[in-house]
Amino acid sequence: MDLSVTGTATDTNLTNWGLDYGPGASPSSWTSIATGTAAVSNGALGTWQTGLPANGTYTVRLQVWDRAGTRSVAANTVTVGNFKVSQSAMESNAGAGGTVTYTSAVPFALTETLVVKNKQGQVVRTLANLQRAAGSYADPWNGRNDAGTLVPDGPYFYVATVTDGTNSLTWDLSTNTSPVSTTPATVGPPRRSTPSTTDR
């Protein structure tokens, strides 16, 4: 997921500014998000691709330099928590006892609903509908509907919905022509980061 970082980078004698992030509360290395030479006042500084780094704590830092070489720094600590769900196979022979396992990587306490839909968009099986703590969860589907009957041959899609009580996310592949195995997405943290620095 892309996260827009907003803030203020101004100085009467501004030469340039840089926005970056690093792992932990006191990073020893930094990765650039954006740079600029024009002042920004309570606006977009850059876009952080939070789907790339691993889950955990990060520091987002804004640095501003003036013509005298003076540097001003503002930093915020944020938590990246990506929810991810994947499937173990693209095909299953349920009549012969085959299953497809859907694995959810839950970064922090969430309520997850995981369903399987047919190509008409109808729910044929609810695999999960409960509160989950941080961890990895495997939900197998044996090709049967909620009544225990084998479903007909055809394409089926999983739909995952998660919420932390304030934010929610739905990943729905039911309108695609074929199932897709994985995709990361963010729900809840990271919250919007708003570093700012003004040097006079």
Image: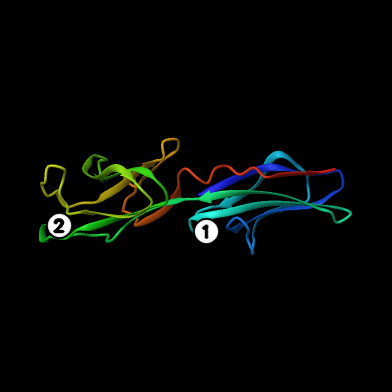
Disc 1: which residue: 53
Q: Is residue 160 above or below residue 99?
A: above
Q: Residue at the location (27% across, 59% down)?
A: 90
Q: Out of 127 and 57, give the one closest to the viewer.
A: 57
Q: Out of 115 and 180, give the one closest to the viewer.
A: 115
Q: Residue at the location (64% across, 61% down)?
A: 30
**Kind of residue at badge 1:** Pro
Mark number, residue 94:
2
Q: Quadrant of the C terminus?
A: top right
Find numbered disc 2 in the image and state the secondary structure of the residue it sits on.
helix
Tell whether 171 sits left or right of 126: right
Tell whether 52 sits left or right of 198: left
Q: Residue at the location (56% across, 46% down)?
A: 3
Asked if residue 181 can be seen in this view, the reply is yes
**Residue 17: percent from the left, percent from the top?**
75, 52
Which colouring convention does the figure follow?
Answer: rainbow
Tell whether 167 sits left or right of 50: left
Q: Residue at the location (45% across, 38% down)?
A: 167
Mark number, residue 107:
none
Find numbered disc 1 in the image and state the secondary structure of the residue it sits on.
loop
Tell whether 153 sits left or right of 18: left
**Residue 111: percent from the left, percent from the top?**
35, 41
Asked if residue 118 can be seen in this view, the reply is no
Task: Specify which label sits upstream in the sequence, 1 or 2.
Answer: 1
Viewer-nearest of discs 1 and 2? 1
Q: Residue furthest top?
A: 166
**Kind of residue at badge 2:** Ala
Q: Out of 68 and 14, give the one closest to the viewer.
A: 68
**Residue 12: percent from the left, percent from the top?**
86, 43
Q: Residue furthest right?
A: 68
